[in-house]
Image (cartoon, grey):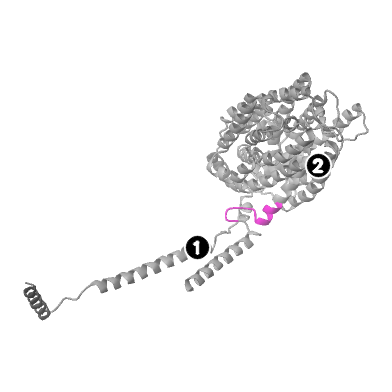
Amino acid sequence: MSKKTSSDKKFAKRAAALGANLKRFWKEPPKGRFLNLQEILRFGVSSLGMSFIANLVSIYVTVSQIPLLYDLGDKGTLHATIMYLIASVLALIITPFYGRMIQRTKTKFGRYKPYILCLAPIVAILGAASVWSPQSLDQTQRIIYVYMLCTPTLLMWNLWYNSFNMFPGVITPNQQERADIWAPVGLVIGFAPTIMNALKGIFVKWGGGDVGAARIYAIFCAVVGIALASALIGVKERVFITQEEEKKEKVSTIEGLKMIVKNKPLMIFTLALCLGCFKGTIDLSWEVIARVKYATNMADAAAIFGGLSLVVGFAATPNMILLPWMTRKFNNRTILIFWQACNVSANLICALIGLQNFPQGSWSPYVITIIRFVSLFNALTSLQPLILSEIGDLQQAKSGYRLEGFIQTFAYQLPLVASQVAALVPALIQTKMGYNPYYYQVVEGSDNILSPELIKIAENYGNVALWMSAVSSALMLICLLFYDLNKKKHAEIVAQLKATAVNADEIAQEQGSLNMLENVVDGIKEEKIAETEENVETLSEETSTEETTDIVPPESGKEQEEAQEEGKEDFSDNN
């Protein structure tokens, strides 16, 4: 009983020590790190809000959804593609100037936060208005409405959300801390679209169709997103400042672009993203294909698609959970190549089978869901900001300027323009094949059963989209083989920045010294040592006692003679 009581006391002591350390962690960063728990939670909450706003636009203001919400005629997909292309080209032109503004910004809130926090409500309001879809307009008016409202929405969304994706690179100079924090934050970011996609099928029934569902979705995302995004105010920016950045002379737009094109890892990464611009072609059409293949009735198929999308939405979850471990064990290139291999193999298998060989209902929803899960089994959206933070460190070491805004131009805007130019190809194919997403809209009061002709058109286009996605993913994979910014090189870059930064001492003062296992692991070690010493002492005493008991004292000479005489008498009697 005494041993048990002692053990309970020791456990309680260790638990109390751990609790005290966690309490300190609320305001004090761990050893070698810069963010305390309070700041990490604020970053997570704000990221969830950003995700709600971002996914309002990325889910509904798309090439596939705009023709579904607005009857834009037979060329609806082409109109949506052109609209997206205009917004992307404008973003590509504006981003270098936007980057120069960021580079020149110096406030007590930092460089990025003022832009992120100011643009968030603007993007939310524009996004909600873009999916509202007024029903009183004729077709020409609807086309004008889409171009006039959706184009600036996409432009502002690009600038705003790309700025937020660069933010992990400026909250701490510790790359592993960036990964350890951004990985769980990525789970939080992925939580919003996963849940909303699962509810999308329910919204379709509540709202009386796709238009009503989009309105419910928009209001919810805008209100919740703006409220949560404001938590970013409590997150501090921490960036090494070089002597060049400290000077009053600021880099011009042309000079910044000239510096950035010499960044070889950035150029290779940008080329890989551009080559992969077709890999999402099939993803833009899965919802329509699901309405054709998941059930004979489109309303039922939409509900099934919404439920199974919850499973597909978690495809990135294992990678997000393992990302801190993966970034410790592997270089970014290795991780990217593995993910691309999953995408290529899944789309290729589905293309070889052919969508026409999937029956309506039956096993089709489950097999297609597995294929979609494997193809999306990656966390590129979580890893890309970490990759760009390393590239930003490299750029700062090479030129004296981080130039994050200019990095956006290549890593985000240029691939986006390439994707939109490339999207003209499937849009033209859709027009040629007679494929129009508007024909697959769920209509309240209708039987929502498709004709064999529409089913065949969707199957044929789906097969083309699968092959385009598979080939594009393969090209991206090949290009990534030449990406050479590894962990060792990046460590050398950070060491160089620390040695030359004018604010190195200031940042060093923010570095934490908290040991989360202080008086916890040490106490266990001391207890084990004491227990071992006690066991050794006990064993030594027991051994000594046993030796004393086993040793028989030697008999005297007289006793030996008497024993011998008794032995002789016994022998004589026996004989």
* Image coordinates for residue 149, horizontal then vertical, percent: 86, 34
On the question of residue 249 being in view, the answer is: no
Relative depth, front residue between 410 and 260: 410
The residue singled out by tag 1 in the image is: 522
Picture quadrant where residue 557 is located:
bottom left
Residues at marks 1 and 2, CA–CA distance in whole angstroms = 55 Å
1 vs 2, front mark? 2
Q: Secondary structure at mark 2?
A: helix
Q: Quadrant of the C terminus?
A: bottom left
Q: Is residue 172 above or below residue 403?
A: below
Rate crowding at label 1 as few (under 14), some (14 to 19) or many (20 or more) other CA atoms within 10 Å: few
Relative depth, front residue between 507 and 78: 78
CB within 8 Å, label 1 to label 2: no
Give the extent of the magenta segment: 30-42
Q: Is residue 388 above or below residue 172?
A: above
Relative depth, front residue between 343 and 323: 343
* Image coordinates for residue 239, horizontal then vertical, percent: 66, 47
The residue singled out by tag 2 in the image is: 203
N-terminal of the pair, mark 1 or mark 2, is 2
Relative depth, front residue between 331 and 373: 373
- For image coordinates 69% across by 43% down, the residue present is 190
Left or right of 401, for residue 203: right
* Image coordinates for residue 397, horizontal then vertical, percent: 60, 40
Circle number at residue 273? none
Q: Is residue 221 above or below residue 441?
A: below
Magenta highlight on residue 170: no
